[in-house]
Image (spheres, coloured by chain):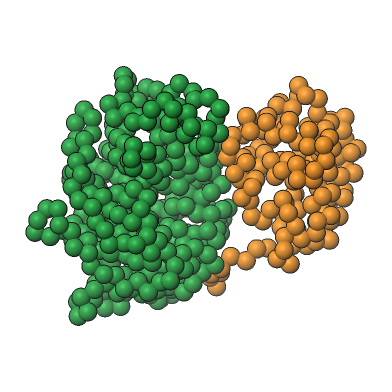
Amino acid sequence: MSFSQIALNNGRPQPITCHAWNADQTLLAFCPNNNEIHIVKHNAGKFEEFEPKCILKEHDGVVTSLAWGHKYNRIISCSQDRNAFVWQQGSQQNQWTPMLVFLRINRAATHVKWSHNELKFAVATGQKLVCVCYFDEEQDFWVSKQSEAFESTITSVDWHPNDTLIAIGGTNNVIRMVCSAIKGVDKKPPIMFGAEKSPKPMHVIAAFPVGGWIHNVAFSPSGNQLAFATHDSSLGFITLPSDRVPDASDVTKVYIKGLALTRLLWLNEDSVIAGGHEPNPTTFHRSGGKWVLGKAIDTAETRSSGPQRRGSMMSNAFQKFEAQSGRGEATVAKKGVETLHQNAITDMCVMSRNGAEVTKISSVGLDGRLVIWDLQSVESKLGSLKL
Amino acid sequence: DIVLCYKMAAIDESAFSAAAKSRLTAVKGSTSDPEKALKLALADPPAGSSNQETLDTSAQATLAAMAAFSDAKVEAGISQLEVQEQTILMSYIYKILAMGSDTASAVALKWHEKLTKVAGEACILRALSANPSILEASRDA
């Protein structure tokens, strides 16, 4: 495994806030911590090559989240400028046209996710509410339905496979399940958690407190479980009951010794991988019905040996000052921080699957690096990913 | 009926206050068995209390328990604690550091270094971001 320094500004690394791949991993979209979305062509090989293709400039503020819908090849971007845009590729390969989304929010948008059928998307906002957007044919733009306002900023949203339920988590320490069916777009939503009748659109179906700020929520591939990363350096797991509303007693937590995790990905129904302020992606496994910590995948064995081709583009002098100001170290250890990511991971994405198994994932971080993790190669070098 | 918002459990201030005082006397009485004293001190933290005195008394109890350990036995004592207790201990350490006393801070800093080595930086994260917390009197009441 090696890294690619894809975000640079005058030779200094730039943080990457979010990234998304297209369906066959030939194109990558990412935001280098400004109001632009960069689209680069990915040539896989011994060293991953990235060719700049185009820059999408429509936002006025930092783009906080990107989602690439593989079914219709549309990118949705949301930003701190309270806007979201849906981008469609034009007839020319490098031409992307933005479609306006009528979000009607007056705070930043923090996270966006396409539904599984890609006809709707959900936007988590700093206005303490979540918007579910659908395309209005008559008006020719995307319209949003808003939920009620909760206690604090929503930081993450994820769709249940049935596309009528979303899980939201925020800085209010509470995870809520909101019915995200839209009248006119969806059929009547299925009854969840043993309720008497169908849930009302944009209404809360379940809510439970967890011990800290929630950074990321994600449903498992079947939708039977929900995993979430909270700021108390732990991942929480809940198996959703079918006959009653889930509450805090259903949550099991797995604590780690490092810093907080901010992004998690489901590898399969029994494995999760997560990264965040802890720059070494760590796996979690369910064995015997209990969730436990697995191995961290960034070790000396999994890193490519020999010099990194896209090695540090900073001179020694820069590195010294970077270490002092960034990490408070008086002297630079020979290799810097001992992981491929030199700083926090901000986003992780599933790249490719082989049937039901996830084979490759990518992570980007505050250090401007993109690392592509080949999980099969990692597993062959580390043995099983379980401890 | 579905509880759609998170309401913190009601806090019984008088119970917290009485518990803190009894913890202090219990700890002072068992300084000959430092590990027992530490477990006593870390039990039932008055999290979310708005009474400054209750929080201070609890912190004093923990300080007395920590001071009962000899330097060599500190790390062994910490390893005996569970994850939750380590987090509570870290919160008390920060509370003691905030009190500003030189002798108390010396003990607290020594324990902070050892606790971080055993429990990792995650312990600091949990102690400082815990809600409800024992670091400062809650202003919700």
Q: Nearer the viewer, residue A121 or A354?
A: A121
Q: Residue at x 55, y 30 (%)?
A: A329
- Residue A60 visible? The answer is yes
Quadrant location of residue A340?
top left
Quadrant location of residue B125?
top right
**Furthest-top residue in view?**
A306
The x and y percentages for residue B42 are 75, 43
Q: Residue at x 53, y 64 (%)?
A: A152
Tell me the quarter of the image containing the N terminus of chain A.
top left
Q: Nearer the viewer, residue B139 or A98?
A: A98
Q: With B80 as the anchor, is A289 left or right in this view?
A: left
The x and y percentages for residue A160 are 35, 60
A384 up-or-down from B138: above or below? above
Quadrant location of residue B92?
top right
Tell me the quarter of the image containing the C terminus of chain A.
top left
**Chain assigned green:** A
Q: With A51 as the anchor, is B80 left or right in this view?
A: right
Q: Colour of chain B?
A: orange
**Furthest-bottom residue in view?**
A138
Q: Nearer the viewer, residue A338 or A51?
A: A51
